[in-house]
Image: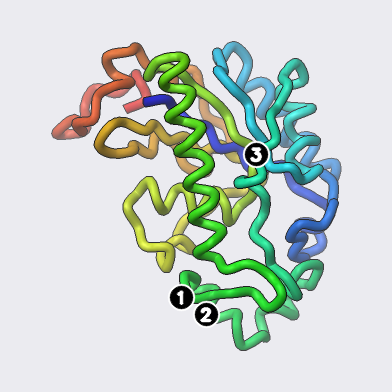
């Protein structure tokens, strides 16, 4: 099946100020715009079969700079977690909330007051990317590569699913602003090819059809060079 590039939006004004933006219409700051421009250089030449995005403006701004010729499709399943009453609050303040240690250690049990359950966020995000991946594989073949621009906790949830981890372990995963994470889905298992990559060459993620369709892991680690 196809290869997914998960792009986290660039840094925002809220990130820089230590706040939890949630679904507020916060925009990229100067650093975030520079991160998006840097991603453009890394994505140059990749034959992207599709580009999809969270509906929030920070993701759309990132793609305007990273892929100026693209026409992204909005995917509501990739929107930020609904943090409810936590939205817009300083992280320093939220760290004193009784719910904070639950978010850290048992996120699968968390339902944000006035907002969304973290388990629901994970389920709809995973369903969205797996659905897109299946459709693009059917249309373009297993060597297809595509990109989704979304948010930190969303990316972490998708990666946890790909690694076979319980959601309670997803806080072990990092997705920095402007980073790229790559997952190749196959008939029997996903392969996490890159995680939180902020500067590496991405061209070797384009695999030949035979390698793209291979579900077996190379014993001993393999020779590399084809994204495996």
For residue 106, the mark is: 1
Q: CA distance from mark 1 to mark 3?
A: 27 Å
- Asked whether residue 173 is in view, the answer is yes
- Asked whether residue 204 is in view, the answer is no
Q: How is the image coloured?
A: rainbow
Residue 26 coordinates in the image, percent (x, y): 84, 52
Q: Residues within 10 Å of mark 2 (few under 14, many from 20)?
A: some
For residue 36, the mark is: none
For residue 75, the mark is: 3
Residue 96 coordinates in the image, percent (x, y): 67, 85
Task: Say whether residue 138 is left or right of residue 116.
Answer: left
Residue 155, above or below 101: above
Q: Residue at x 33, y 38 (%)?
A: 190
Residue 95 coordinates in the image, percent (x, y): 66, 79
Residue 113, above or below 52: below
- The residue under label 2 is 102
**Mark 1 element type:** loop
* Occupied quadrant, residue 147: top right
* Occupied quadrant, residue 150: top right
Residue 113 coordinates in the image, percent (x, y): 68, 78
Q: Nearer the viewer, residue 221 or 55?
A: 55
Dots 1 and 2: beta carbons under 8 Å? Answer: yes
């Amino acid at each position: 099946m196809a290869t997914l590039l998960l792009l986290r939006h660039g840094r925002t004004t809220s990130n820089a100020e230590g706040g939890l933006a949630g679904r507020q219409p916060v925009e990229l700051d100067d650093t975030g715009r520079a991160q998006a421009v840097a991603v453009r250089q890394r994505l140059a030449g990749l034959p992207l079969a599709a580009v999809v995005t969270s509906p929030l403006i920070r993701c759309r701004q990132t793609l305007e700079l990273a892929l100026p010729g693209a026409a992204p499709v909005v995917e509501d399943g990739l929107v930020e977690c609904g943090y409810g009453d936590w939205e817009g609050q300083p992280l320093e303040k939220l760290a004193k909330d009784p719910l904070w240690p639950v978010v850290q250690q048992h996120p699968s049990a968390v339902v944000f007051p006035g907002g969304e359950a973290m388990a629901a966020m994970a389920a709809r995000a995973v369903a969205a990317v797996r659905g897109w991946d299946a459709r693009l594989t059917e249309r373009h073949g297993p060597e297809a590569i595509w990109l989704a621009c979304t948010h930190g906790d969303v990316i972490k949830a998708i990666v946890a699913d790909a690694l076979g981890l319980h959601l309670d372990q997803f806080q072990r995963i990092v997705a920095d602003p402007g980073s790229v994470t790559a997952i190749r889905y196959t008939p029997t298992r996903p392969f996490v090819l890159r995680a939180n990559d902020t500067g590496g060459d991405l061209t070797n993620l384009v695999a030949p059809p035979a390698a793209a369709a291979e579900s077996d892991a190379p014993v001993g680690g393999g020779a590399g060079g084809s994204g495996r």
